[in-house]
Image (cartoon, grey):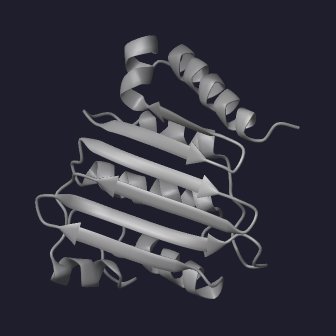
Amino acid sequence: MHASVCDIIADLAQNAIEADATRIEVDVATDPSTIRVRIQDNGKGMDERTLAKAKDPFYSEPGKHDRRRVGLGIPLLMQTASAVGGAVDIQSEPGKGTCVSFTLDARHLDTPPFGDLPETFLGLMAFGGSYDLILKRTTPADCYTVSRGELIDTLGNLEEIDNLILARAYVRSQEENLNPS
């Protein structure tokens, strides 16, 4: 199983970046009983045959991963969701993109820990390329939205460590505001 929910998010968002998406929306909503995630992109998308293969742990798109022959992200997500009473829905259309949505029972003993969303999000933002990555985070207490494009406009290049540190502090402060002590 995945080490954390954020690892699942990172894997799916990285797939979108690798699928040449120029816009990736990550919606993460949590409450005491449920974790809901939707990752939608405008990348190259998949036809039904390719989508069926993507659910096979022994398949990886040719040329996608130079050093491995398997793609475990979606199969492990499906196994994790099934094990904890969750659900996975994947919609994809060639030339239009892919939307992966999943829910997990936050109270289930086998649900992976949530993880560090600000660190995950900023790790994804540091990938080179022309894409916008938008995170919308919601809890019963509050919500926030942050995008790679806005951070780049404000801070400059996110490949520079000083700018990445400032971006991390900002996103972490937004996350902390969701759970006031």
Residue 178: percent from the left, percent from the top? 71, 39
Residue 20: percent from the left, percent from the top? 21, 48
For residue 45, what is the image quadrant? bottom left
Residue 156: percent from the left, percent from the top? 40, 13
For residue 73, what is the image quadrant? bottom left
Q: How many marks?
A: 0
Give me the residue at 61% from left, 61% from top.
Answer: 5
Seen in the picture, residue 130 relative to 68 is either above or below; the reply is above
Q: Quadrant of the N terminus?
A: bottom right
Q: Quadrant of the C terminus?
A: top right
Give me the residue at 65% from left, 57% from top.
Answer: 30
Seen in the picture, residue 165 relative to 155 is either above or below; the reply is below
Residue situated furthest left in the rendering: 95
Residue situated furthest right in the rendering: 181
Give me the residue at 68% from left, 53% from top.
Answer: 115
Residue 66: percent from the left, percent from the top? 29, 61
Seen in the picture, residue 150 relative to 143 is either above or below; the reply is above
Is 152 positioned to the left or the right of 109 in the image?
Answer: left
Camera-side residue: 113 or 86?
Answer: 86
Observer able to see residue 8: no
For residue 95, what is the image quadrant? bottom left
Is 122 positioned to the left or the right of 85 in the image?
Answer: left
Seen in the picture, residue 17 relative to 46 is either above or below; the reply is above
Observer able to see residue 14: yes
Give me the residue at 28% from left, 52% from top.
Answer: 18
Is 12 positioned to the left or the right of 161 in the image?
Answer: left
